[in-house]
Image: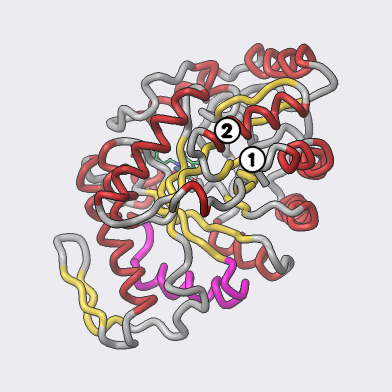
Amino acid sequence: MSDTARDPLRLGIFMPSVSHMPNISHYKAQPDDWTFDSNRQIAQAAERAGFDFLFPVSRWRTIGGEIDYHGKSLETMTWAASLLAVTSRIQIFSTVHVPVFNPVVAAKMGATLDHIGGGRWGINIVSGWNRAEFDMMGIEMLDHASRYERSEDFITILKGLWTEPPGTFNFSSGHYQVRHGYVMPQPQRRPHPPIVNAGSSPDAREMAARQCDYAFVCPVGIDDATALAADFKARARRHGRDIRVVAMVQPVWGASREDAIAERQRVIDGMDAVAVRNWADGVGLESGSFTAQTLESFSFGAGSLPLLGTATDVADGLADLYARGIDGVLMSYHDYLQDTTRFADEVVPLLRARGVL
Ligand SMILES: Cc1cc2nc3c(=O)[nH]c(=O)nc-3n(C[C@H](O)[C@H](O)[C@H](O)COP(=O)(O)O)c2cc1C
């Protein structure tokens, strides 16, 4: 993708499909919004406000701590199905843990979701890091490199089933056997629904470069975004491909910068140290991807890049990310429903004025 042909910045919401989004803290500005009804209202508000996509968190059991972080969660294939049915334009992703799904079943579910949404569904591939989730299911967790090897096979199978003539796709590896693979109907979206990966280890980067349409990343600071975007894109180019890079950010904006900074401080002051530790130990384990993050940065937005200040500061931060090669943002909010419309009213016009949208 050359810069001259660049698409506008894609705006996405990291949805509260799990309890206690978005911060790992006792402090919560608003009541928990994980319920389906709340997700539906946010989805419809996001669609009305012109957002591009919705993205869930997929969790199978609590992360724990005093706040019971992610203690309740909606399964994201069924979550997407129901939200696709009550929206008409916005793209909606599901997150699939590779060890939990047979790829033929995931391809069939994905094709169904694509048809429910008329080509608006996409998939986030998670190789798996949360040992407690897999222990619960009696599923063995592979070493980091093998996990990504299996995820890459999984994606190859999805693409084969979604694009090859029905009944002709065969695949054989140490992880999977598919004979005369058949998924009909195939997705409406051509060549196939968009495929995301959200890891930043070398294993993840190589897999994303070879196989994925989007890499979702957590820049540690705004400068880090430049290197992250450039690295993913250079790796993809080496495989003759394009990849778009989406940054996870948490905008908090108010009448003044002091208001936004005070809100962040309330989150940090209320940090649930046990839940943060559980999260950091789990997600960072063996990956080395979160070594630059602090416990505070996990508490505030679970690793999202904070964008704090006034609406102008947030718009400047987003425009800066775009200029640094970031193609989209996955935003979490303190009050999802209110901030979705507030973002559209207060920040979107500033982004338009900056030529980012
Ligand atoms: C934006 C984003 C969304 C993610 N969503 C999930 C999720 O829903 N469920 C999950 O178990 N892990 C999720 N992860 C974790 C990643 O899939 C991955 O395991 C983690 O980033 C470490 O990967 P790495 O070791 O390859 O760097 C997410 C990560 C990011 C950055």
Q: Residue 314: name its quadrant.
A: top right
Of label 2 and label 1, which has the lower sequence position? Answer: 1
Residue 279 visible in the picture: no
On the rendering, which quadrant does ligand 1 occupy?
top left
- The circle on residue 19 is 1
Query: Disc 1 residue type?
Result: Ser
- The circle on residue 69 is 2
Q: Position of residue 208 (x, y in %)?
A: 34, 50
Q: Which residues are magenta?
A: 100-120
Q: Position of residue 203 (x, y in %)?
A: 26, 42
In the figure, 57 relative to 85: above or below?
Answer: above
Residue lying at 43% horizontally and 53% vertically, measured from the top left: 1
Q: CA distance from mark 2 to mark 1?
A: 7 Å
Q: Residue 135: name its quadrant.
A: top left
Q: Magenta part mainly helix, strand or loop?
A: helix
Q: Position of residue 2 (x, y in %)?
A: 44, 50
Residue 92 is left or right of residue 199, and the answer is right
Residue 191 visible in the picture: yes
